[in-house]
């Protein structure tokens, strides 16, 4: 979404107008990107070298770069605050833990209250997320939400180096994931083969045991039948013994009866 101040660009038709526009742009509290302005035809045509240098510092430089200018433009309070905010964003992109002492020195801050005010303004401007640790005297950066413009060859080379490093990490990670995936696939195939072999052996053993089990059951059934028949025969013989007319006792009784008669 374009910033409302861009509507003034067509009105830039002189060096004075270009200088005024640069002041307005670098003072606007909610404008933190300036690369577009550096390449706009109206500004490129009419901007002075000092204003161009200042705009380039706001785009990708720091407070230290501003102090190195041979003839620095006097900054307003709003411009000073913004450049220090952008410098803090640059520092936060390099380290997630910034000591108070470092920030005092780099940003020319006088005390913890001024530092806290700057950090809070960055948080409310959605430039970064941070917390002050007064006991440890450090600023803990949890997230950098705004990036700096890339306008110079040095910044482009740095960005290329970061992208190359990220690309190498991605390639390494992809290779590691592919290796792990291959190991998992091989283990799964081996496990499936082991399961199939186990099932085959179980089926073979069951096939060998089934006939034996059936034979034993048939033998047991036959034995039980014979035993039952034998028992029935024994019982019948016992009954016959008790009721047979040809037993010894019956013969003796008949002989006694004949002798008596």
Image (cartoon, rainbow, N blue to C red):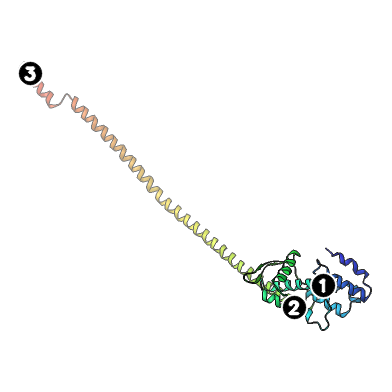
CA separation in Å, label 2 and label 1:
17 Å
Residue 48 image-quadrant placement: bottom right
- Residue 207 position, x and y percent, is 43, 51
Which residue, given by chain and number where applicable, does mark 3 sit on?
258
- Distance from disc 1 to disc 3, alpha carbons, whole Å, reads 154 Å
Q: Residues within 10 Å of mark 2 (few under 14, many from 20)?
A: few
**Callout in the foreground (1, 3):** 1
Q: Earlier in the sequence, mark 2 or mark 1?
A: 1
In space, the residues marked 3 and 2 are separated at their CA atoms by 148 Å
> Label 1, on which residue?
35
Q: Nearer the viewer, mark 3 or mark 2?
A: 2
| Classed neighbour count for the residue bearing mark 1: other residues with Cα under 10 Å, few (<14), some (14–19), many (≥20) | some
> Is the Cβ of the residue at disc 3 closer than 8 Å to that at disc 2?
no
Res. 131 image quadrant: bottom right
Q: Residue at x 80, y 76 (%)?
A: 57
Most extreme residue toward the top is 261
- Residue 136 appears in which quarter of the rendering? bottom right
Residues 167 and 211: in front is 167
Seen as rendered, the residue at the extreme left is 260
Indicate the position of residue 145 as horizontal and vertical percent values: 73, 66
- Disc number placed over residue 157 in the picture, else none: 2
In what element is the residue under mark 3?
Answer: helix
Residue 164 percent location from the top left of the image: 70, 74
Mark 2 lies on a secondary structure that is: helix
Disc with the residue nearer the chain's start (3 vs 2): 2
Locate the N terminus by quadrant.
bottom right
74 horizontally vs 115: left or right: right
Which tag, 1 or 3, sits closer to the chain's start?
A: 1
């Amino acid at each position: 979404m374009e910033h409302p101040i861009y509507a003034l660009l067509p009105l830039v038709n002189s060096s004075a107008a270009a200088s005024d526009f640069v002041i307005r742009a670098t003072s606007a509290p909610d404008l933190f990107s300036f690369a577009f302005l550096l390449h706009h035809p109206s500004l490129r045509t009419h901007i002075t070298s000092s204003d161009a240098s200042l705009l380039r510092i706001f785009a990708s430089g720091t407070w230290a770069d501003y102090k190195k200018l041979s003839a620095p433009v006097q900054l307003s309070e709003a411009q000073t605050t913004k450049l220090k905010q952008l410098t803090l964003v640059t520092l936060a992109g390099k380290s997630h833990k910034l000591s108070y002492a470092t920030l005092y020195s780099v940003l020319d801050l006088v005390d913890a209250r001024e530092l806290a005010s700057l950090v809070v303004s960055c948080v409310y401007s959605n430039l970064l997320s941070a917390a002050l640790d007064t006991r440890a005297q450090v600023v803990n950066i949890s997230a950098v939400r705004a990036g700096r413009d890339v306008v110079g060859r040095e910044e482009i080379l740095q960005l290329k180096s970061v992208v190359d490093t990220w690309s190498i990490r991605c390639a390494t990670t992809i290779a590691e994931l592919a290796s792990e995936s291959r190991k998992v696939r091989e283990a799964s195939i081996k496990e499936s083969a082991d399961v199939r072999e186990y099932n085959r052996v179980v089926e073979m053993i069951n096939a060998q045991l089934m006939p034996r089990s059936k034979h034993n059951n048939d033998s047991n059934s036959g034995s039980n039948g014979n035993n039952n028949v034998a028992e029935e025969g024994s019982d019948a013989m016992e009954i016959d013994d008790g009721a047979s007319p040809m037993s010894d006792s019956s013969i003796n009784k008949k002989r006694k009866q004949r002798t008596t008669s």
